[in-house]
């Protein structure tokens, strides 16, 4: 619909692209940055069980990344030891 708010898609707007409530959100993002506003929303509104799944996936990816880094470091250390001998 051409006259719906571009952010919430619930309110009708005839002279602007976003409604007054969404303008408040946009103003906060301009004041504090988008990352901070998203962080606050994530801390306050996201259900913990969904966060836990997301954190588990992130931790798994970090472990995989750390494992490959450790292998590379070990190979590097072996090369250094071989040079000394």
Image (cartoon, rainbow, N blue to C red):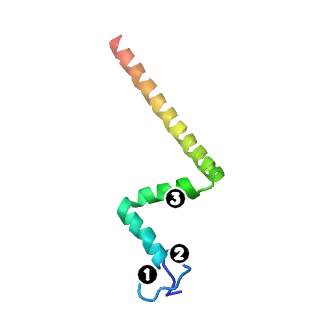
* Mark positioned earlier in the residue sequence (1 or 2): 2
* Mark positioned earlier in the residue sequence (3 or 2): 2
Residue at the image point whose x is 42% and y is 69% from the top: 26
Residue 17 at x, y percent in the picture? 43, 81
Q: In the rendering, which numbered label is found on residue 41?
A: 3
Which residue is outermost to the top? 85
Residue 37 shown left or right of residue 9 in the figure:
left
Work out whether residue 65 or residue 48 is closer to the camera in this orientation and state it. 48
Which residue is outermost to the right? 49
Q: How far apart are labels 1 and 3 at the CA level?
A: 23 Å
Work out whether residue 56 or residue 46 is closer to the camera in this orientation and state it. 46
Q: How far apart are labels 1 and 2 at the CA level?
A: 11 Å
Residue at the image point whose x is 33% and y is 13% from the top: 84
Query: Is residue 60 shown above or below 46?
Result: above
10 Å neighbourhood of mark 3: few (<14), some, or many (≥20)?
Answer: few
- Asked if the residue under mark 2 is in contact with the one under mark 3, i.e. CB atoms within 8 Å, the reply is no
Residue 11 at x, y percent in the picture? 53, 82
Which residue is outermost to the bottom? 14
Which residue lies under the disc numbered 1? 17
Quadrant assignment for the N terminus: bottom right
Residue at the image point whose x is 44% and y is 71% from the top: 24
Q: In the rendering, which numbered label is found on residue 8?
A: 2
10 Å neighbourhood of mark 2: few (<14), some, or many (≥20)?
Answer: few
Residue at the image point whose x is 56% and y is 41% from the top: 59
Quadrant assignment, res 82: top left
């Amino acid at each position: 619909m051409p006259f719906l708010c571009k952010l919430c898609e619930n309110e009708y707007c005839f002279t602007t692209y976003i409604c007054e409530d969404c303008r408040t959100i946009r103003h906060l993002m301009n004041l504090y940055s988008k990352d901070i506003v998203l962080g606050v929303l994530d801390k306050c509104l996201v259900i913990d069980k969904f966060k836990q799944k997301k954190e588990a996936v992130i931790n798994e990816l970090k472990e995989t990344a750390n494992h490959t880094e450790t292998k590379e470091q070990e190979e590097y250390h072996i090369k250094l030891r071989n040079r000394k001998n």
